[in-house]
Image: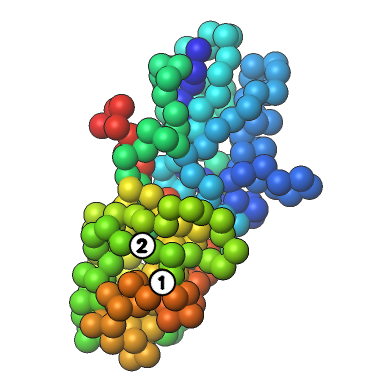
């Protein structure tokens, strides 16, 4: 049978989700906990390859086992064996045909900016402290955000060296929300290229600083030229926020 786990984690001390030799990752830590419960080391597949320092409010992973454990008890069993910065929120049995990556219809990421001159110790490693922006600058960012919505070739918003053949993605929405001293940048799409969200955030910050005009965004996208987009924003502010499956939503 195939188990589907819903997770949350703070990625600060992990080298991303995927197993890497000699490094601490979410996947290897989760496998350790599953092995402790099921008595055998089982392959685990994740819904996304989050990078070092990236967090997840909602993440899904699957593994197969013939050992029956009630799905209402499995989160408690795993959480007792996981560190406090990873939590299994729920579990369920899914059809063998279900694929935790291929059956994703869309994902939402959120990037947190701390819009303050004073650091917040509770947000260290969990939000990027940017230069203070006023309402006018945030308005420019919102205008620029409109240029990203729709289906485009985002190869200019992908880190150099990434080997992805199909670089066309459809962005459903890109919102910029003021929340006290936080600015929440939320973006949903049918998929994301390597570092795509962080490069979009870096580009929006360039817009706020006046280095890029909002009207330039469509041209930058169409150029497919990485050098015309902004810098890659730090990983610490990025969260996988929501995952929507065709089979369940």
Q: Are marks 2 and 1 in contact (CB under 8 Å)?
A: yes
Question: Which residue occupies 43% across, 52% down?
Answer: 166
- Element type at mark 2: strand
Label for residue 224? 1
Q: Is residue 61 above or below residue 216?
A: above
Q: Nearer the viewer, residue 45 or 224?
A: 224
Q: Is residue 109 above or below residue 111?
A: above
Q: CA distance from mark 2 to mark 1?
A: 7 Å
Question: Which residue occupies 33% across, 34% down?
Answer: 245
Q: Is residue 37 above or below residue 19?
A: above
Name the side, left or right, on which 185 lies relative to 172.
right
Q: Residue 91 at x, y = what percent?
A: 44, 24
Asked which quadrant contains residue 39, the reply is: top right
Asked which quadrant contains residue 186, the reply is: bottom left
Return the residue at label 2.
153
Q: Earlier in the sequence, mark 2 or mark 1?
A: 2
Q: Residue furthest right?
A: 22
Asked which quadrant contains residue 220, the reply is: bottom left
Location of the C terminus by quadrant is top left
Label for residue 175? none
Q: Nearer the viewer, residue 187 or 135?
A: 187
Name the side, left or right, on which 246 lies relative to 59.
left
- Element type at mark 1: loop
Question: Which residue occupies 28% across, 87% down?
Answer: 213
Q: Residue 154 at x, y = what percent?
A: 39, 64
Name the side, left or right, on which 136 lies relative to 84.
left
For the question of whether residue 237 can be seen, the reply is no
């Amino acid at each position: 049978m195939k188990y589907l786990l819903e997770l949350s984690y703070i990625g600060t001390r992990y080298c991303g989700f995927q197993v890497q030799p000699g490094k601490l990752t979410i996947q290897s830590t989760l496998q350790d906990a599953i092995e402790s419960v099921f008595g055998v080391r089982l392959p685990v597949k994740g819904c996304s390859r989050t990078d070092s320092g990236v967090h997840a409010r909602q993440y899904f992973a699957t593994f197969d086992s013939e050992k029956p454990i009630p799905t209402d008890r499995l989160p408690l069993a795993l959480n007792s064996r996981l560190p406090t910065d990873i939590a299994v929120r729920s579990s369920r049995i899914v059809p063998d045909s279900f694929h935790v990556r291929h059956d994703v219809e869309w994902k939402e990421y959120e990037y947190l900016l701390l819009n303050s001159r004073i650091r917040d110790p509770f947000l260290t490693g969990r939000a990027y402290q940017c230069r203070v922006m006023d309402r006018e600058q945030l308005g420019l960012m919102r205008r620029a955000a409109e240029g990203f919505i729709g289906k485009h070739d985002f190869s200019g918003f992908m880190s150099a060296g990434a080997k992805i053949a199909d670089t066309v993605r459809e962005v459903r929405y890109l919102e910029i929300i003021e929340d006290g001293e936080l600015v929440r940048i939320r973006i949903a799409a049918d998929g994301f290229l390597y570092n795509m969200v962080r490069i979009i955030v870096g580009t929006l910050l360039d817009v706020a600083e006046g280095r890029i005009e909002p009207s330039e965004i469509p041209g930058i996208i169409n150029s497919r030229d990485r050098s015309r987009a902004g810098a890659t924003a730090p990983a610490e502010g990025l969260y996988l926020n929501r995952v929507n499956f065709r089979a369940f939503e």
